[in-house]
Amino acid sequence: MTPVPTPPATDLPRCTWCGTDALYRHYHDTEWGVPQHDARMLWEMLMLEGFQAGLSWITILRKREGFRRAFAGFDPQQVARFGAADVERLMADPGIVRARAKIEATIAGARIYNAMQSAGEDFAAYCWAFSGGQVLRGDGVHFATSTPLSEAISKDLKKRGFKFVGPTIVYAWMQAIGMVDDHAAHCFRRAQQAR
């Protein structure tokens, strides 16, 4: 179980989606929308967003440390070596979402990530090339669930063999990794990110 961080200040205006849950607020205040350029973390977040399909993000967030333990710290080199016995081990692990298709997609995703790296294609450079290396800012009022850019990224990821990477999942990932700043206009993080 993920340890609950020190409760964030409650008097700050935030995006409404994070509610009053201390873990959710901590994630919102310190991670969500912060530009991430570490290739392995980008891959980890893409895989976790895939596990979210059909579920709420707080469910994944509460199990994130369990996912990290189960998937060898999201080390793609190790995860790519997982076999049938590992899939069964993961299917029995209450610390993660036990969905066989998502588990198998993560293992396959590790192999794709490794193949890209072996071919000299840095995953971070690949991801950020879609936005021209820039953070895209929403207007803080209207919030999309997918965009033409998330559709293009989704299409390319699928072409490479990634699964659970539809346009909506990809857009949520783009928000999470800070490729898109979709903090609400009233949110204190929007003003901080703009600096």
Image (tube, rainbow, N blue to C red):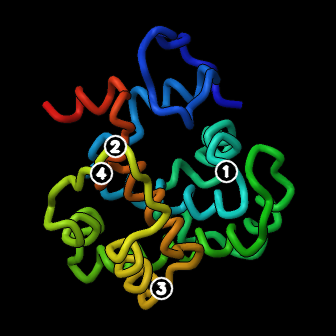
The residue that label 3 is drawn on is 158
For discs 2 and 1, the disc positioned in front in the rendered view: 2
Label 2 – label 1 distance at C-alpha: 36 Å
Considering only order in the chain, which callout, 3 or 1, is on the residue closer to the N terminus?
1
Mark 3 neighbour density, 10 Å: few (under 14) some (14–19) many (20 or more): some
Labelled pair 2, 4 in contact (Cβ < 8 Å): yes
The residue that label 4 is drawn on is 138
In this view, 156 is above or below 78: below
Q: Amino acid at mark 4?
A: Gly
**176 left or right of 55?**
left
Residue 73, percent across and down?
A: 53, 48
Residue drawn at 32 percent across, 28 percent down: 189
For discs 1 and 3, the disc positioned in front in the rendered view: 3
Residue drawn at 61 percent across, 40 percent down: 61
Residue drawn at 42 percent across, 85 percent down: 155
Q: Amino acid at mark 3?
A: Lys
Q: Which residue sits furthest right?
A: 92
The residue that label 2 is drawn on is 140
Front one among 81 and 53: 53
What secondary structure is found at the residue carrying circle 1? helix
Mark 1 neighbour density, 10 Å: few (under 14) some (14–19) many (20 or more): some
Q: Amino acid at mark 2?
A: Gly
In this view, 81 is above or below 174: below
For discs 2 and 3, the disc positioned in front in the rendered view: 2
**105 left or right of 141?**
right
Residue 8, percent across and down?
A: 49, 13
Q: Picture quarter containing residue 123?
A: bottom left
Label 2 – label 4 distance at C-alpha: 6 Å
